Amino acid sequence: MISNTFENVKKIYKKHAKIINIVLIILLLIIPRLMPNSYLMGIVCRILMYATLAGSLNIINGYSGQFNIGHAGFFLIGAYTEAILATTYGWSFWPAMIIAGIVTSIVGFLVSLPTLRLRGIYLAIVTLGFSEIIRIIALNWTDVTGGPMGIKGIPSPELFGFRISGPVDYYYIFLIVGILFLFITNRILKSRVGRSWISIREDELAAKSLGVEANRAKSANFMYGAFWAGIVGATYAPYYKFIASDMFTLDEGFNILAMVIIGGQGTLIGPFVGASIATLISEVFRFASQYRMVIYAILIIVMMWWRPQGLVGAYDSILAGDDKSLKKRKKSITQKVGDN
Amino acid sequence: MAEIILEAKGVSKHFGGLKAVENVDMEIYRGDIFGIIGPNGAGKTTFFNICSGIYEPTYGEILFKGEPIRNLNPEQIARKGMARTFQNIQLFKNMTVFENVRIGFHIRTKTRMFDAIFKNKTYQSDEEFVNEESMKIIDKVGLSAYKNTMAGNLAYGIQRRVEIARALALNPDILLLDEPAAGMNPIETNNLKEFIIKLNAEGYTIAVIEHDMKFIMSLTNRLLVLNFGEKISEGTPEIVKNDQNVIEAYFGKGKIAGGENS
Ligand SMILES: Nc1ncnc2c1ncn2[C@@H]1O[C@H](COP(=O)(O)OP(=O)(O)O)[C@@H](O)[C@H]1O
Ligand SMILES: [Mg+2]
């Protein structure tokens, strides 16, 4: 049923892509004017931010088939890099954001090195360890990171001479970052580079036998995903004006992972759907926030059982598959979960 | 005499105590259709895996176009001009035939992230090249009707052809085919044979593993017979057919034993 609805929506979209895109962009641009309520816009901002963040994880998990569960570590590095550059060194937001992306990307490369020989659960454990180590460094390297006090008073960015602060305005920064992410990523995925990532996910040995340098491609994939996690981290820091290491725990990593799984790996739209659902759930269940992870867990189990490719998961476009391969994937995913 | 394109010198591969391949010498000349036969478990696939860099030999050396390659990995060897198919078909099952073939062009294109983001000349000419050439190969292998079908949904025999198409995209100097006729019906097998001969006439050197004697005898110009990892015979089909070692390995001593089944 979902796939049919999704198929139909896709068909309609393809038919009128241009008009729909324009309407969509206009709509996106005027949302804050229609809804100048900072509580509601706060939710929209979170959705947008997490959509890009989950999207960046989806690059790694969904497209090259690696299994990164320590994405919060990359998110942290982006946020801290921007915060430190902006507060200690007085950088303005935009260059600090770019540097944050690059620094995170370099760390992504370093993390990818020991993981090239690892797969599945072993790779997952390394990324998990990395995430915790990074958080502990942020907690203890007091001179640079403020230690347990975190970093306060992170200055708001400027855009066309205006100081951007508060959800109603900051929305535009998340929107720009999100659109850039989608635009650039879409181009990469539809090129030789994206094809090589997908081929590794589908069958690494076959990819290698066709001359795809799997290790290099996996590193590049990790770097690209980490880059955007860093960019999102960098936009997050001045949004909240304050960051501390406890905002980047493993819980946060699982949170991002849950969005990707719920929405669907290997599609561009999946993480957006996942981020919306997860954000709304955590908003609705705010009174029971400590049970949020339980709700995610239940949701993930249900998804695995009922729709392993996620709500709008792959299997359309170049990834489409029949029931048989679906069942196979279901099996392999249940196995993966079983391994955990 | 033609150039030796692929050469094995005393190649062995041991898995623990199991000598899957033991001290095998082989010479494939440019232009050959070279056959490797032997009963199931004889070490044929393992031998191909050594040639294509999936395994490093325990002993011995492999020379490809005169260059030692035992320390190279599969992607490096592919770049040097060797392409292969797999006995247990390894297609990208969730991708269309067209996508499968397009990935085969990886080493012949050079788009990097930067080129893709800006859709510059490199990207455009690569995409154009890949799309056009992929269509040509798909036509040539007779898969036009399945261009947009998911590879995993195709019949076995057709999947094998997709795998060959994908390997051809590399424009290799040598093509290694591991049991390409397995799972094919007699008509498909015959078409495959004609297709291999056609490829060979176009200049491809081909090495093919098969345990269907009739198929291989009428296809190859030289072949090598493995049994329990060791070379027991080699030469033209005529020589091999009459070799006492081969007759014993395949048919036992006077009695017809397994070899073709399994
Ligand atoms: N990765 C491996 N590990 C252990 N034993 C293997 C491995 N690959 C193949 N073998 C063994 O090596 C022998 C030769 O196998 P193979 O090369 O597949 O034979 P063939 O292709 O001629 O049927 C078999 O006994 C097989 O079980
Ligand atoms: Mg075999």
Image (cartoon, rainbow, N blue to C red):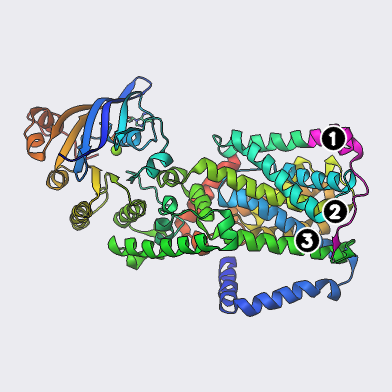
State yes or no: discs 1 and 2 in contact (Cβ < 8 Å): no
**Residue type at the position of mark 2:** Ser
Does dot 2 land on a helix, a strand or a loop?
loop
**Cβ at disc 3 under 8 Å from ligand 1:** no
Quarter that holds the C terminus of chain A: top right
Image point 88% across, 53% down: which residue? A240
Q: Which residue is mark 1?
A: A139
Residue B220 horizontal side relative to residue A24, left or right? left
Q: Nearer the viewer, residue B47 or B127?
A: B127
Q: Earlier in the sequence, mark 3 or mark 2?
A: 2
Quarter for ligand 1?
top left
Examine the rendered structure and indicate whether residue B100 appears above or below residue B175: below
Q: Position of residue B242 (x, y in %)?
A: 6, 34
Neighbour tally class for label 3: few under 14, some 14-19, many 20 plus, Cα within 10 Å: many
Q: Residue A280: x percent and y percent?
A: 78, 60
Quarter residue B13 falls in: top left
Distance CA(mark 1)–CA(mark 2): 25 Å
Q: Tell me the residue at 41%/56% (across/down).
A: B100
Q: Quadrant of residue B153?
A: bottom left
Secondary structure beneath label 1: helix
- Closer mark to the observer between disc 1 and disc 2: 2
| Residue at which label 3 appears | A174
Q: Residue at x 81, y 44 (%)?
A: A80
Residue type, numbered disc 3: Phe
Q: Which residue is mark 2?
A: A92
Q: Is residue A152 magenta?
A: yes
